[in-house]
Amino acid sequence: MQTAHTLDMLRKEVARLRADGSTFGLVPTMGALHEGHLTLVRRAREVCDHVAASIFVNPAQFGPNEDLDAYPRQLEADAAMLKAEGCDLLWAPDVTAMYPDGFVTNISVSGVSEGLCGASRPGHFDGVATVVCKLFNQVLPTHAFFGEKDFQQLAVIRAMARDLDLTQPHVHSIIGVPTVREPDGLAMSSRNRYLSDADRAAAATLPRAMKAAIARFEAGDAAAPALAALENELLSAGFVSVDYAVLADSASLVPLAALKGTPARLIVAARIGGTRLIDNMAAG
Ligand code: PAF
């Protein structure tokens, strides 16, 4: 596996890997890799001839009081994991390679980025859309792989790639990969390592309470009482607050009052200790 830290190095490697017109998958990450990321790499290897991963802790998607400085950074360990999975290329730029002096562009996707995490983390999805657009133009993948755990992020990226015509020159397909979970159901996340033992045990209430809410939606209950019960259960288990718990249309992410026979998703963000957890599950 080659590692590129500069755009020049990256371009040479990309040209080499793409020379025979083969398919080329990109797995964008912020590092601190876990089984969820490695599942994306494995999926990319099944679908594509060559696979690149990127590791870049993107300052543009963190708010002023968020965990940018604390975000785990472990480039060597991550590189070893990617190599063991058969990744061909690692793109690991530093902040000045990604945002050189004078960088002034911002990509803002309206609609799908506005509610949910967009409301509780202002500017977050602008930062995601901007860096992912840059990654697509830098790496020129034919396929890109993202975890469904960040369901709204996936919707924002699909909208950005469609609207900026990135799907024609190179990124033909953006593939969402189902969330990988711990044995007790907690969705894997690089931020789970922030949890104390007690909070980690209580965090398993989140997927359990979500499944109970989905069972109620599917039994015909309206969204509001089932979501209120879900919030109460999280707060009783020791969650500090619930940013949102929403039953939403899977495509538009517009909130639904009840299931109506079209694909829907239960999407939740809640805080435990100092950590904000997000999760989502299909409903109906
Ligand atoms: O999901 C992530 O790890 C990040 O948001 C991404 C897509 C790599 C952009 O920085």
Image (cartoon, helix red, strand yellow):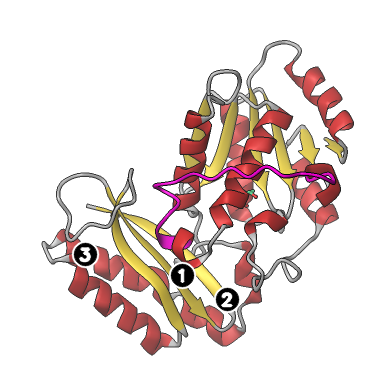
- Measured as percent of width and height from the top left, residue 138 is found at 73, 31
- Measured as percent of width and height from the top left, residue 36 is found at 58, 52
- Amino acid type, residue under disc 1 in the picture: Asp
Q: Which mark is residue 215?
A: 3
Position of 249 relative to 203 (above/below) = above
Q: Quadrant of residue 86?
A: top right
Q: Residues within 10 Å of mark 2 (few under 14, many from 20)?
A: some
Position of 116 relative to 101 (above/below) = below
Q: Is residue 107 magenta?
A: yes
Label 3, label 1: how far apart the Cα atoms are: 18 Å
Label 3, label 2: how far apart the Cα atoms are: 27 Å
Between marks 2 and 1 in the image, the one whose residue lies nearer the viewer: 2
- Measured as percent of width and height from the top left, residue 190 is found at 64, 63
Q: Residue at x 33, y 68 (%)?
A: 210
Residue at the left extreme of this rendering: 220
Between marks 3 and 2 in the image, the one whose residue lies nearer the viewer: 2
What range of the chain is rendered magenta?
A: 99-117
Q: Which mark is residue 184?
A: 1
Towards the viewer: 231 or 59: 59
Label located before the other in sequence (3 or 1): 1
Q: In this view of the protein, can residue 180 be seen by the observer?
A: yes
Looking at the rendered structure, the secondary structure element under dot 3 is helix
Q: Quadrant of the N terminus?
A: top right
Residue at the top extreme of this rendering: 20
Looking at the rendered structure, the secondary structure element under dot 1 is loop
Q: Which mark is residue 275?
A: 2
